[in-house]
Image (spheres, rainbow, N blue to C red):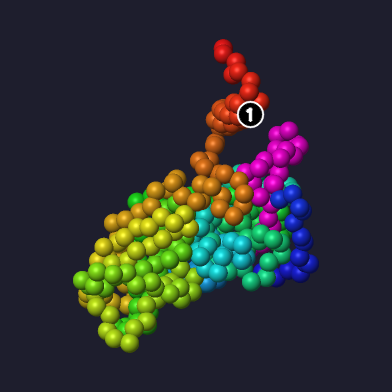
Amino acid sequence: MSWQEPCDPLPKNILARIVNFNASHITADPYWVAARATWYGAPTGAGPYDNGGACGFKNVNLPPFSAMTSCGNQPLFKDGKGCGSCYQIRCVNHPACSGNPETVMITDMNYYPVAKYHFDLSGTAFGAMAQPGRNNELRHAGIIDIQFRRVPCIYPGQTVTFHIEHGSNPNYLAVLVEFEDGDGDVVQVDIMEANSGWWTPMRESWGSIWRMDSKRRLQGPFSLRITNESGERLVAYQVIPANWAPNTYYRSNIQYEAFGSAAGQAIGFGSAVGLVISSAAGLHTVITGIIGLICLVLYHLHGIEVPQF
């Protein structure tokens, strides 16, 4: 879609505001960050051609992506190392907004941001933030205010999967990495050839695709070692067989823990996220615990005996 609007700078205080539709007032919440959102492609599509654009993901209109995808500007895309990361988003300041969080994955690059953080969503993801029956009304707005927070990716029943890209040959191997729980992203891939005993760093080709160039024939089977943003490494031993073929998926038997990742700490956005709290009682328990911990620290600093109850 097309629109024309000058870039709006974010306020200095990037702590997002919750819109409480029942009480009709706004309260501060340090777990959400302000952003803006647009959408592109078909109104109920996954973006252009239903593929993952600059990240290289395939068939993002199908599960587990299910068209809930977004382009991210540089702070989100991170020169491709943000590919696959997951965010909860919710829209605010529009009458059609539901206020309910939806989870999207970064699958493409946003080259023309209108804010410090700009999600250019699929039509499906944009409409998902609307109240029932008001999807088209929200999409008609074109550009809206939203809030976001980093969350762990969860791919039920999936393990880390490798796709040998078109054009790979005995001297050139290009591998797409996808379906990583937790951080959802990959910052380094290393390869071990058959019986070599050592790891060789692969180079990031583009997006979530990593490559190995060689003047000699590469010797399979290949083991791959992946590193996520948290610095956690997993090894898929001989996941790519000696008789590998281009345009083929190879599923590993490895997977990250969803909630032990940098995503649970809102990397780059300053606030801890952790598990999503869905009930007021759970939120009250967490807040009470934090206040209690702060009180204990203050008592200790001032040499005050901790009260006994």
Q: Position of residue 259 (x, y in %)?
A: 45, 45
* Amino acid type, label 1: Leu
Residue positioned 60% across, 46% down in the render: 271
Q: Is residue 249 among what the camera can see? A: no
- Would residue 200 be counted in the magenta stretch? no
Q: Position of residue 204 (x, y in %)?
A: 45, 73
Question: Of 63 and 248, which appears nearest the observer?
Answer: 248
Task: Write down the quadrant of residue 201 in the picture.
Answer: bottom left
Residue drawn at x 41%, y 55% as measured from the top left: 232
Residue lying furthest top? 309
- Name which residue lies at 71% across and 44% down: 17
Numbered circles on residues, count: 1
Residue 48, above or below 140 = below
Q: Residues within 10 Å of mark 1 (few under 14, many from 20)?
A: few
Look at 56% across and 50% down and name the residue there: 266
Foreground of the two, 173 or 153 = 173
Q: Which residues are magenta?
A: 15-44
Residue pointed to by mark 1: 301
Q: Magenta includes 16?
A: yes
The residue positioned farthest toward the front in the image shown: 303
- In percent of width and height, residue 225 lies at 34, 64
What quarter of the picture does the N terminus occupy? bottom right
Q: Left or right of 11: which side holds 294?
A: left
Residue 193, percent across and down? 26, 73
The quarter holding residue 75 reads bottom right
Q: Main secondary structure of the magenta part?
A: strand
Image quadrant containing the C terminus: top right
Above or below 302: residue 119:
below
Left or right: residue 33 compared with residue 272:
right
Label 1, secondary structure: give it. helix
